[in-house]
Amino acid sequence: MSDRIHTLSGYFYEYQKSVTEPESFWARIADSFHWKKRWDKVLKWDFEGPNVRWFVNGKLNITENIFEKNLFAYGDRTAIIWEPSEPGEDVRKISYKELYHSVCQFSNALKSKGIQKGDRVIIYMPMIPEAAIAMLACARIGAIHSVVFAGFSANALTDRIIDSGAKAILTSDGNYRGNKKIGIKAIVDEALEKSAVETVIVCQRTGQDVTMKAGRDYWWHEVIVGEKDSNVAEEMDSEDPLFILYTSGSTGKPKGVVHSTAGYMVYTKYTFENVFQYSPGDVYWCTADIGWITGHSYIVYGPLLAGATTLMFEGVPTYPDPGRFWAVIEKHKVNQFYTAPTAIRALQAYGTDPIAPYNLDSLKVLGSVGEPINEEAWRWYYNHIGQSRCPIVDTWWQTETGGILVSPIAGITPTKPAFATLPLPGIQLAIVDPEGNELTGNSVEGNLCVKYPWPSMIRTLWGDHARCKETYFSTYKGMYFTGDGVKRDHDGYYRILGRVDDVINVSGHRMGTAEVENAINEHPLVIESAVVGYPHEVKGQGIYAYVICDMAHRTEENLINEIKETVSKIIGPIAKPDKIQIVSGLPKTRSGKIMRRILRKVAEGSTDNMGDTSTLLDPDVVTKIIEGRK
Ligand code: WT7
């Protein structure tokens, strides 16, 4: 593992090299992969298009780099440990060789159903090994997967089926949530009332009843019968899309972030090995769901490319009790544990009693992702879970960045509570003021940009390159704009301050305020709404909605519940507002723009200084809103 950074000076050396000679830096790392044909040029780019191409004209298949390249060396090593939701149910351990055969067999079944290179396939599945097999089988034959988090509603699924033009959906009969069975196939059926795909393949998990439509719906265990468990991986171009992953933005419509094959492969493996300092034989556990980018890059692709043993957990942190995470760490002797601040804060609320029965001595590295981790949660995590001896890697990145951009390298570069610290090799950051001037030196604060390409960066938004340019490459000329505010302290360490756009981060999940507003407005009695985030003890940010409506003989309580249900149905339970305030008017400027600054202040309870409200059409509205605050 020559690409591993082992010392602090090694980090500075590699970082320097990656900036002065980026192409030879990345060529050296990419050379350790298997190419069907080596690239002609490492990088061609401009951020005007944007048009970014890494490992130009290289030919490869990412699954060959997980399997064929390594099966002789470690085919019998465990690739996936699967821990079921029910603690008493059997654990599944799948070796690299077994995973290879399952992926080949299922990819042959996909081909038999007419799915080809370039086709889009939606994966709407719970956290079972077949979900990873589904992703890899698509990659094997060059189909573009788009995983949709199984907590999203039928309506949200319909939107993604239509936008991606999907040909097939891979799903399951149901899912376990604690001791409840939740229908998944039923949601797919509902989504397909307003959209269409040729094929649906259903993996059996809960055994619950489902309806199967003849000629469209097939059982997973039936389609693989008679299919060979080997094949030749499809030859892909470096820049062929590997997957689409939908994420929220500041308008109502989710964006289909497109990641390409080679750059994503090189960057996720490199960052996985370095950030977590993974050594062969270690057991690594990331608690994310495969429906998010974290699940893609750091449960499936990064770890499997690195030959790691990756643990996949079907359940939730509080079932059967709030000690579950710690029980799983003890049971599987987990070495690297990667979770979200919201989970840490939720478990912190139960005190240390649920931790006490378990031996956490196997832990070497702790990770955090998804939102800024507050100092209190950082210290609790460090002291009680890491026993004051495990470094915490606070990893900052985004769906669009594909992999971690700013993070400590475990045990090698310093950590600092609430700081993501330093950029990884290859990442050239810039902090800019609102006019786009770069702020150099330390002790500065502004908006976070990246001024040079990195291999796993977003290539386009599916079907909307103009929106890609507009969202990320137009705010500041010649730079990728992240949407986050940031501070670089006196030591040169980066601290992410949170979103500066109309995006809120609820329990580490990105939510567009406009998207929630659109959903609220679907309720027939709603006239207008405005949504903002406010500080929430566990979720990081909560959703606060101000709604103008026609009361139509309903009590306020009934109406509020109905609105919550509407949002749950349109997007999914994760988007349900925490607080809804019925108002008679919204603070608007004379040009009709809602002054969100005021709504944010009221939501967070700091109502003593409202700032300048003189441009408001009707300043009285503010007084009324303050009086009615929830
Ligand atoms: C947004 C991206 C990256 C995978 C999960 C979320 C926030 C993410 C951190 C961190 C502070 C963070 C940012 C970013 N964020 N990680 N370590 N410290 N903020 O992916 O849904 O694409 O959201 O999450 O605001 O822009 P995502």
Image (cartoon, rainbow, N blue to C red):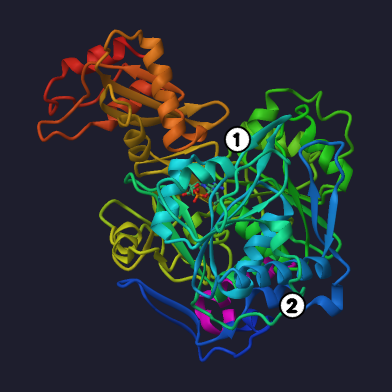
Neighbour class for label 1 at 10 Å: few (<14), some, many (≥20)? many
Evaluate whether residue 158 shows in this view: yes
Q: Which residue is drawn at 33% across and 57% down?
A: 471
Residue found farthest to the front:
214
Residue at the spot of label 1: 342
Q: As rendered, which of 604 and 212 lies closer to the eye?
A: 212
Most foreground residue, 443 or 266: 266
Indicate the position of residue 143 as horizontal and vertical percent values.
Answer: 55, 70
Report the residue at 38% width, 35% height from top.
516
Where disc 1 sits, the SS reads helix
Query: Spatial distance from mark 1 to mark 2, Cα to Cα?
Result: 35 Å
Whether residue 484 appears in this view of the structure is no
**Which of the 4 image quadrants contains residue 14?**
bottom right
Q: Is mark 2 on a helix, strand or loop?
A: loop
Q: In which quarter of the image is residue 64?
A: bottom right
Residue that carries the numbered disc 2 in the rendered image: 2
Query: Foreground: 601 or 40?
Result: 40
Give amino acid for label 2.
Ser
Of 166 and 611, nearer the camera is: 166
Query: Residue 157, image x and y in percent?
Result: 47, 47
Can you say which quadrant of the picture contains the C terminus?
top left
Which residues lie in the magenta part?
2-26
